[in-house]
Amino acid sequence: MKLTKYTHACVRLEKDGQVLVLDPGTFSEAAKALDGAHAVLITHEHKDHIDVAAVKSALTANGDLQLFAPAGVAEDLRSEAPGAASRVHAVDPGTSFDAAGFGIRSFGGQHALIHPHVPMVANIGYLVDENVYHPGDSFIIPDGISVQTLLVPVHAPWNKVSEVVDFVIGVRAPRAFPIHDALLNGTGMELVEGHVKRLGARYGTEYTHLSSGESVDV
């Protein structure tokens, strides 16, 4: 499986001629990531995880594109793109389904706490082909599941470095790559990734930096 990172939280997975895109948000190159996609997974409603205009355009242009998202996001997209309503699917946590030939399991249910005065929203983490885990905006660990490739939210208004490290240690995937990094400059990335790489290695996780547009086989 080929994994390509785009800016911030968006990744594109490709295998056997099929393309799955996760969280094409407004901070990412959403239109580029969605080009030729067969399915899209959205973790939650925040704009840095879903560029509604780009997703609507892709759904309208591609009559085969399927999209999966938490119920509230799915409902809004059906209103935005009524012609594609039958291809927009609501996802609950704790379910399994197929998306363009990729096996998906869903986890979590809630966005991490930003502040008690900021309303909570639904958030679904996705495990793809028993391999790649995208947690969205949460540190939910898939209990009893052996994750092979962990996508790590390295910086956000809702996290701190110790929580990032604990998440990596808790999942204990053999390899990990960054997501949710658009708010960090180079100095911040170096600082956070230094801790994650050093401490994660103690527990068997090889953390590797990926720049936007860079691809790896997983």
Image: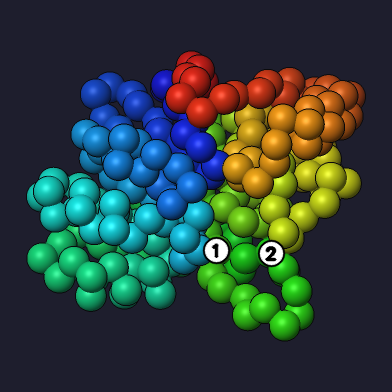
Give the residue type at disc 1.
Asn
Give the residue type at disc 2.
Ala
Residue nearest the viewer, comparing 165 with 143: 165
Q: Position of residue 167 (x, y in %)?
A: 77, 45
Q: Please tell me which residue is depicted at 14% across the width and 55% down the height of the picture.
A: 60
With 37 as the anchor, is 199 left or right in this view? right
Mark 2–mark 1 contact, CB under 8 Å? yes
Q: Position of residue 162 (x, y in %)?
A: 88, 46
Query: Please, what secondary structure does the residue beneath circle 1 have?
Result: strand
Report the residue marked by disc 2.
112
For label 2, count other residues whose C-alpha is less than 10 Å away and answer few (under 14), some (14-19) or many (20+): some
Q: Residue furthest top?
A: 217
Q: Position of residue 190 (x, y in %)?
A: 78, 28
For label 1, count other residues whose C-alpha is less than 10 Å away and answer few (under 14), some (14-19) or many (20+): many
Question: Marks 2 and 1, how far apart in space?
Answer: 8 Å
Mark toward the start of the polypeptide (2 vs 1): 2
Q: Please tell me which residue is depicted at 23% across the width and 75% down the height of the picture.
A: 79
Q: Position of residue 133 (x, y in %)?
A: 56, 40
Query: Please, what secondary structure does the residue beneath circle 2 have?
Result: loop
With 198 as the anchor, is 58 left or right in this view? left
Residue 170 visible in this rendered orientation of the protein: no
With 75 as the anchor, is 27 left or right in this view? right
Q: Please tell me which residue is depicted at 62% across the width and 76% down the height of the picture.
A: 120
- State which quarter of the image contains the N terminus: top left
Mark number displayed over residue 123 = 1
Residue nearest the viewer, comparing 6 with 150: 6
Q: Please tell me which residue is depicted at 29% across the width and 54% down the height of the picture.
A: 55
Quarter assignment of residue 134: top right
